Image: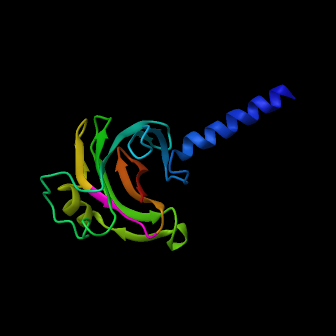
Amino acid sequence: MRRLYSKLGVVICSVVLLSGCSRDKVAGNIEVDWEKDERSYTAIVKDDGGTERVRLECQYVGKAPEEPVETEISRNWSTDDTDFYHFKLVNLTDKPIELKQVSFRLKKGKEGKVYEIKNQKAIELDWGSAVIAPNGDLSRRNAWTWGKGKENVLHKIYLATSDGQTFQIDTQLVYRR
């Protein structure tokens, strides 16, 4: 009986670790290491074969963007509650990684389903490129999220390809009032 409880404990811990602090399903093969603020994290994204492809570094900025604001923010964050993040995608391989599209999903609302998909051109506009150079990185400053309720999680799920492999990079932007 003790062995059964031990195995059950391992399964429960695994589910909690995989879901991260957002307590939400994530896309792709990703291991998330949340910081104490339960908003910032580092994640390792693997392809289906288990090869580490990307390190995702997500840092919570706060309720206002960090200056200087280089790209226009389409939300009035000074009157509408908003959370801001910086994040970076680091290529862990010696092959280029191409970001093909990005889909958007909320933990709460829109039935938890993908509600918008943007193409590679939109990614290039947001990031300046849709390709992460070998052993290089792409950074985004002042990405933002908001919610109607007390809390939510915005998933920006990038479909990526590299060296004949396709994989997903699930960025999780946590919103809290």
Q: Residue 43 in the image: state x and y as whole percent.
A: 41, 40
Image-quadrant location for residue 47 = top left
The vertical placement of 35 against 149, above or below, is: above
In which quadrant will I find the N terminus? top right
The vertical placement of 118 against 19, above or below, is: below
Q: Residue 63 in the image: state x and y as whole percent.
A: 30, 56
Please name the residue shown 25% across and 56% down the image.
Answer: 64
Q: In the image, is 13 to the left or to the right of 57? A: right
Please name the residue shown 75% across and 36% down the image.
Answer: 8
Please name the residue shown 44% across and 37% down the image.
Answer: 36
In which quadrant will I find the C terminus? bottom left
Q: In the image, is 49 to the left or to the right of 12? A: left
State yes or no: residue 144 in magenta: yes
Q: In the image, is 173 to the left or to the right of 20? A: left
| Magenta residue span | 143-148
Which is nearer the eye, 122 or 9? 9
* Residue at the right extreme of this rendering: 1
Image-quadrant location for residue 163 = top left
User: How many numbered badges does the structure rendering display?
Assistant: 0
Q: Residue 20 in the image: state x and y as whole percent.
A: 52, 44
Which is nearer the eye, 29 or 106? 106
Q: How is colour applied across the structure in the image? A: rainbow
The vertical placement of 73 against 143, above or below, is: below
Image-quadrant location for residue 103 = bottom left
Q: Residue 173 in the image: state x and y as whole percent.
A: 39, 54
State yes or no: residue 153 in magenta: no
